Image: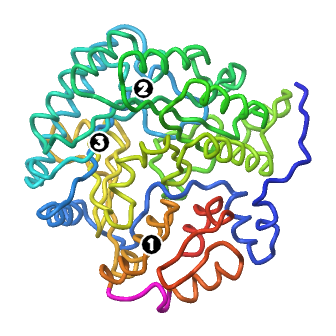
Amino acid sequence: MTRVLTDSEPRVWAALQDPANAHLLDYVTEDPFGAHVFPGNVPGYGVDDFLGDLSDQLATTAPIHLWSYIPTCAYKCRFCQYPVVLVKGGRNEEKLSQWVDWNIREARLWLRRVPELANAPVGEFNVFGGTPSLLPERDIRRLLDFYRENFGFTADTTIRFEGDPSTFTPAKLETLRELGCTKLSSGVQSFDDDVLRECGREHSSQMCVDFVRNAQAAGFEWISIDLMYGLLDQTVDSVRRDLDVVLENEVTAVVCTKLHLKSYAETRTGVAGEQPAPWQLPQYREKLVRDGHFWPTLQEQYLMREVLTDGLRAAGYTEHPTMYFARDGLGPEKWKSIMVDQDKQEAEVAIGLGGSSSCRTSEAITDVNWKHYAQAVDEGRVPLGSATGFDATAREARAVKMALSTLQPVRDDLHRARFGRSLHDDPWREKFASLAGRGLVSVDDGGVALTEDGEVLVEAIINTEL
């Protein structure tokens, strides 16, 4: 396979070559994920501790993010680290229905253990995966009806459903609209058929376009797609063509994600399944190179990011939080803003295998081993696999990190009201002075704002300096 290397440099490259930022370069070179899960720092924290913290917060709460994780997939992508269960061969519908059964039974356990959940207003309810769009229509109806009837849905609650573009049939789209779903998300990843094939995706780029157009025709107000960059055999020109397709089809929102090969289990910044993704295996990656494939360089990855960021902003999309783009006037991502916006940072409750839940004082992850998960549900236990707490210092740091990830200015008045001290006091004064000296943030009386380089490197800053 012929590869043409670019000699262009992304704008952030100069900052990454600064010796004072060597730790940031190390971070992005090692490829850890960031700004997704914010782990606690108190060891030995129990599941009951987390559930108690959540109960306390929900007693007086603003709208929360509630999500249901359906882990079933027809196949596993070569980059996927998440806990998924493959549903293949005969009795598919029976297997899919079983996961809806378990999800509903788990939800009942949460409601029994944390009664405040029944009345906590739900800002956004998301059915994520996995590939929940694989579910038969009767099970989609059963799942959504259960949540609407048993949780605090209001007139302002939005319902969102995720799936593979090839599985959103016109009949399923009609069912989802009937059930009050107004938002759809789909992991398109790329509009380049060669790139999709190397990822192990079993849909074509045309299927992705058809999904967007069918969803638009069906009247969905929010159609979001995921795009990935840094994929095997992907070029800057390929990403540029992806952007062209997005703009041509007037997609509502785009989530742009860099390929991450370091294990989430190792970094504790995402939810990892029990088995590594094929591409995480060094011997597998090396064989691909020997066979004539290539991995984009770090420089090329940042050029890809720049193409997407510049192109979407120029076309009238707003980025909030980092690498989540929505057409002007329609964003930010509601479920994300509930959790990370400085004036919100409310609870997230995730029901299903490998779900990530959090409140202001602790967080927990549901078991990722499906047999252990099923056993816990069958025995009447909320199937949380682990929990960690935040001490007072970590709570404050977590709040600042989440606020920075929105790319909005971090306001000093909001911080003082919540934590009783200013961002201009130590330890923040020294941290932000260092970042400002390297051109990554600006500081004034009102608070702290990321510069252009700071926005690009926000995940590295959050995970190495704060």
Residue drawn where x is 25% and y is 64% of the image? 46
Mark 3 residue crowding within 10 angstroms, few (<14) / some (14–19) / many (20+): many
Identify which amino acid the numbered label 3 is placed on.
Answer: Trp
- Looking at the image, residue 332 sits to the left or right of residue 46; the answer is right
Which disc number belongs to residue 400? 1
Label 2 crowd bin: few (<14), some (14–19), many (20+), radius 10 Å = many
Q: Amino acid at mark 1?
A: Val
Quadrant the N terminus occupies: top right
Of badges 3 and 1, nearer the viewer stands: 1
Mark 2: which amino acid?
A: Gly
**Which numbered tag is attached to residue 67?**
3
Q: Position of residue 294 (x, y in %)?
A: 81, 35
Q: Mark 3 to mark 2: distance in Å?
A: 14 Å
Residue 203 found in image quarter? top right
User: Which residues, given as a range, are shown in magenta?
Assistant: 420-427
Position of 444 relative to 62 (above/below): below
**What kind of secondary structure does the magenta stretch mostly adopt?**
loop
- Residue 221 in percent (x, y) is at 37, 30
Q: Earlier in the sequence, mark 3 or mark 1?
A: 3
SS for callout 1: helix
What is the spatial separation of the Cα atoms under label 1 and label 2, in whole angstroms? 32 Å
Vertical position of residue 381 compared to residue 267: above or below:
above
Q: Is residue 14 left or right of residue 49?
A: right
Residue 52 location, quadrant? bottom left
Name the residue nearer the viewer: 316 or 364.
316
* Side of 150 where 248 appears, left or right: right
Q: Earlier in the sequence, mark 1 or mark 2?
A: 2
Residue at which label 2 appears: 163
Task: For label 1, count other residues whose C-alpha is less than 10 Å away and answer few (under 14), some (14-19) or many (20+).
Answer: many
- Asked if residue 167 is among those painted magenta in the image, a careful observer would answer no
